[in-house]
Amino acid sequence: DGEVNSSNMLKALSQFMVMMISSNSKYDKYVRGEDQVALTQVEMDGMATFQAKCATCHATDLFTDQSYRNNGLFVNPQLNDEGRFRIFENPADLYKFKVPSLRNIEHTFPYMHDGRFASLEAVMDFYDSGMVDNGNVDPIFQREDGTLGITLSDYEKESLIAFLKTLTDEEFLNDERFSEY
């Protein structure tokens, strides 16, 4: 009807968001077998590491399971960001944050809900050896020896980052329909 009201604004926003689909990354083209696209050996190794150590939380074509998890971040006492607990006040939600999509992760820094890590390398180091027990860490991060983290060699970190970069969809990122600039 053309009238500016909340109902029409919601419809317009919904239509705009439906158009925003990132599905033409190197990884997507590789999976679809398009254009003779091949992953390098390092990217393939990273994909294997990803499937073994990351895909439980970063699942599906969106590379997220849409869940909320406590991943053992050090709690800044000045902020005391309690995550999902602040919404529902359920103690089981303390320090849980939504598992993000990894699509276009190369360009979405800084990382974590509070932007504490400036690089993917810093994120890898955190998961390997920087997690802390803040009282409610997701059991998926419990190692057999009782410590927290995801054990990653230097090569696994390097190859994971190479794989994550294959999730970058330059066509989507440069689509003029989604930008004024």
Image: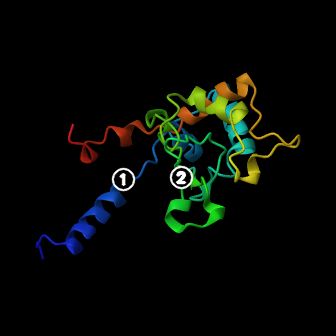
Local secondary structure at mark 2: loop
Picture mark count: 2
What's the image's color scheme? rainbow
| Circle 1 residue | 20
Label 2 amino acid?
Leu
| Circle 2 residue | 62
48 left or right, relative to 89: right
Q: Quadrant of the C terminus?
A: top left
Q: Is residue 96 above or below residue 164?
A: below
Residue 29 in the image: x percent, y percent? 52, 42
Q: Nearer the viewer, residue 158 or 97?
A: 97
Say the numbered circle drawn on residue 57. Answer: none
Q: Residue furthest front?
A: 78
Residue drawn at 34 percent across, 56 percent down: 19
27 left or right, relative to 134: left
Q: Nearer the viewer, residue 112 or 49?
A: 112
Q: Mark 2: few, some, or many residues within 10 Å (few <14, many ≥20)?
A: some
